[in-house]
């Protein structure tokens, strides 16, 4: 295994953070997105979401704020965040009207100085990938917020993407602050019918070339991937990415194998995420029930993290990550023994498991209210002991 196939998220300026390793042979990690919007610029609400996400087991957090004082919000989140924090610098650049080449890089350096551990930079959105998008039009053009901003900027200014054109400058900043660059999928498909098209593949080829340049400069790299992808294409897309980007850690949003489940897209993403991670993806970005509908609440954040953690764990079992099956074996033993306290303790969401068990309790302490005296485990265990 190439040692570059694992990254360690840890900006030394982010005090009190627990470094997180992502990549080949390791357990699948889960990220939770939080952040303000113009309609809801409340930092207190985002700090609640941060707390909920950490308690639910998120390995990393991303601050995607686009409302209020972006710098102040980021610093508040950083100071309260015990896990690596990621950002998308182009968001601050567009909100603060700093959309010049110099302004875009200034934002990156400011965020690095603050202690941000990893950053999504859409380096693969350039004249070449935009040309592919024009050549093969989509049902849904560009659904990446950062990607769309750069497409507009490039076309209006008739100038190449500064993050692509001056990629070496980006590498210098990343190396200076030990930032992991997450090369963003600005051309990710937002509909299953657009998956695997020319724009998506061309961007991936560009990111593969940039990965080699980053490694030569000593910079850690993550590659971001789709998006909305039909179930039967997910495995091949993951393998293509791993091949094109030389095994660099792969970070996926979902993927979502259907477009028709608003309100339940955390479940849709868990279905796609399980297959993606079992096929080689290393890092899952959660999706909440409010995806495509609005800004998530703290409860939505929790549900999104839990759904992604279930997907990650299922994939770790399939990938034979050391220790992954042990958790399930321990739970099975607790179920065999009808040990409700132990089952709740081992549950991925103990609070929810306890709430359900208490709400519909059986009259008998040793069984649940689903089967009662007809509990299969109790009947079979007693029968086998007697005979």
Image (spheres, rainbow, N blue to C red):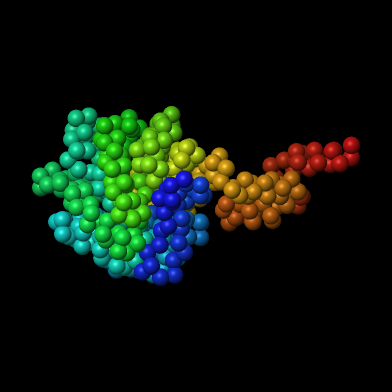
- Residue 119 x/y as whole percent: 32, 56
Front residue of 97/167: it is 167
Left or right position of 387 against 266: right
Front residue of 230/352: it is 230
**Residue at the spot x=20%, y=43% of the render?**
126
- Residue 186 x/y as whole percent: 27, 44
- Residue 263 x/y as whole percent: 42, 43
Q: Is any part of residue 238 visible from this angle? A: yes
**Residue at the spot x=67%, y=46% of the render?**
329
Left or right position of 320 against 139: right
Front residue of 241/285: it is 241
Q: Is any part of residue 182 visible from this angle? A: no
- Residue 237 x/y as whole percent: 39, 34
Quadrant in the picture for the C terminus: top right
Q: Quadrant of residue 203?
A: top left
**Residue at the spot x=56%, y=46% of the render?**
321
Q: In this figure, what is the number of numbered marks?
A: 0
Left or right position of 57 against 182: right
In this view, 355 is above or below 189: below
Q: Can you name the residue that lies furthest to the right here?
A: 387
**Residue at the spot x=75%, y=52% of the render?**
365
Front residue of 164/187: it is 164
Q: Quadrant of residue 384?
A: top right
In this view, 277 is above or below 103: above
């Amino acid at each position: 295994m190439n040692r570059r196939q694992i990254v360690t998220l840890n900006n030394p300026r982010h005090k009190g953070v627990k470094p997180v390793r992502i990549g080949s042979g390791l357990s699948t990690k889960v990220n939770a997105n939080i952040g303000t919007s113009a309609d809801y610029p409340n930092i207190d609400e985002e700090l609640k979401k941060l707390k909920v996400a950490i308690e639910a087991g998120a390995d990393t957090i991303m601050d995607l704020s686009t409302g209020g004082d972006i710098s102040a919000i980021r610093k508040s989140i950083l100071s309260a965040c015990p896990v690596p924090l990621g950002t998308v610098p182009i968001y601050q650049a567009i909100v603060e009207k700093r959309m010049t080449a110099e302004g875009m890089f200034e934002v990156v350096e400011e965020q690095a100085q603050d202690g941000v551990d990893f950053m999504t930079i859409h380096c693969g959105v350039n004249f070449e990938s935009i040309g592919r998008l024009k050549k093969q039009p989509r049902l849904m053009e560009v659904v990446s917020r950062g990607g769309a901003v750069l497409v507009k900027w490039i076309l209006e200014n008739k100038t190449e993407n500064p993050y692509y054109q001056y990629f070496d400058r980006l590498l210098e900043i990343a190396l200076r602050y030990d930032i992991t660059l997450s090369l963003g999928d600005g051309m990710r498909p937002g509909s299953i019918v657009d998956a695997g098209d020319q724009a998506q593949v061309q961007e991936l080829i560009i990111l593969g070339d940039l990965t080699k340049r980053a490694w030569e400069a000593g910079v850690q790299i993550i590659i971001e991937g789709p998006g909305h992808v039909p179930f039967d294409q997910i495995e091949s897309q993951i393998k293509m990415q791993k091949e094109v980007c030389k095994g660099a850690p792969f970070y996926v949003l979902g993927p979502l194998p259907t477009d028709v489940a608003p309100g339940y897209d955390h479940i849709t993403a868990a279905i796609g995420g399980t297959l993606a991670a079992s096929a080689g993806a290393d890092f899952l970005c959660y999706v909440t029930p409010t995806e495509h509908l609005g800004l998530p609440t703290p409860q939505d954040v929790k549900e999104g993290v839990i759904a992604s953690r279930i997907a990650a764990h299922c994939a770790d079992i399939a990938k034979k990550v050391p220790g992954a099956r042990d958790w399930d074996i321990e739970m099975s033993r607790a179920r065999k023994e009808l040990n409700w306290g132990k089952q709740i303790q081992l549950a991925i969401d103990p609070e929810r498991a306890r709430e359900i068990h208490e709400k519909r309790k059986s009259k008998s302490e040793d069984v649940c209210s689903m089967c009662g005296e007809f509990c299969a485990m109790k009947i079979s265990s007693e029968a086998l002991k007697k005979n």
